[in-house]
Image (cartoon, grey):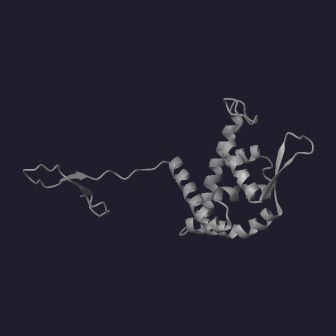
Amino acid sequence: MIDRRKDSRDDVPVPARRDSKSRRAPVVMPAQPKEELGVRTLITRARGSVLLSLDAELERYGVTGAQFEVLKNLFRNTSETGASLCRTLHYDTGSMTRMLDRLEEKGLVRRERGARDRRVVLLRLTEAGERLLPRIRPAARRALRRHLTGFAPEEVESLKDYLGRIIANGRREEAQAPGANTGRSKSGAAR
């Protein structure tokens, strides 16, 4: 059996095949080079790590990190409809509908028809949602602070700048794409 614990050596022993007649010494193979991760993978993994930590912090309040993001956006009035939340948070409509259903079942969000256009379904925080948000914000800050442990304040500012530039470049590219500002993808499906 191979001992899978990491050691400081560069070579990892690999067991040789055993036949019934003889016992051979293990063959030593060079270790694989450490995987170098790309920017996209690192951003994706960092986001996932922060969300997992956020989920753990918010569990006692009965909400997830993704639900917190929805509540926060509704509180800020940056999004009023499911479609605008999908664009802001980059969720598909099916996932967003299920998330909004759960938040509505918990009494944190309510849906109401638009006064000018009854086809539009507006999203509003309930009183319970408005009371919960200030209570869970410190938990969200704790989760993020743990991920920024060891960063100097200047490094945090640089990170914010870099991420902001990535977002701005993406928005610029979206605005220049064919069919931009229609709320539809190239296939014509609602985003």
Image height check: is 24 above or below 140? above
**Viewer-nearest residue: 21 or 180:** 21
Could you tell me which quadrant the N terminus lies in?
bottom left
Q: Position of residue 106 (x, y in %)?
A: 74, 59
Residue 190 is drawn in which quadrant?
Answer: top right
Tell me what residue is drawn at x 68 percent, y 38 percent.
174
Image height check: is 11 above or below 87? below
Residue 63 is drawn in which quadrant?
Answer: bottom right
Tell me what residue is drawn at x 78 percent, y 52 percent.
78
Could you tell me which quadrant the C terminus lies in?
top right
Residue reaching furthest to the left: 21
Q: Position of residue 77 (x, y in %)?
A: 81, 54
Residue reaching furthest to the front: 105
**Viewer-nearest residue: 138 or 3:** 3
**Viewer-nearest residue: 168 or 46:** 46
| In this rendering, position of residue 89 left or right of residue 154 | right
Number of marks in the rendered image:
0
Image height check: is 106 above or below 145? above
Q: Position of residue 4 (x, y in %)?
A: 30, 60
Tell me what residue is drawn at x 69 percent, y 48 percent.
98
Q: Position of residue 112 (x, y in %)?
A: 85, 49
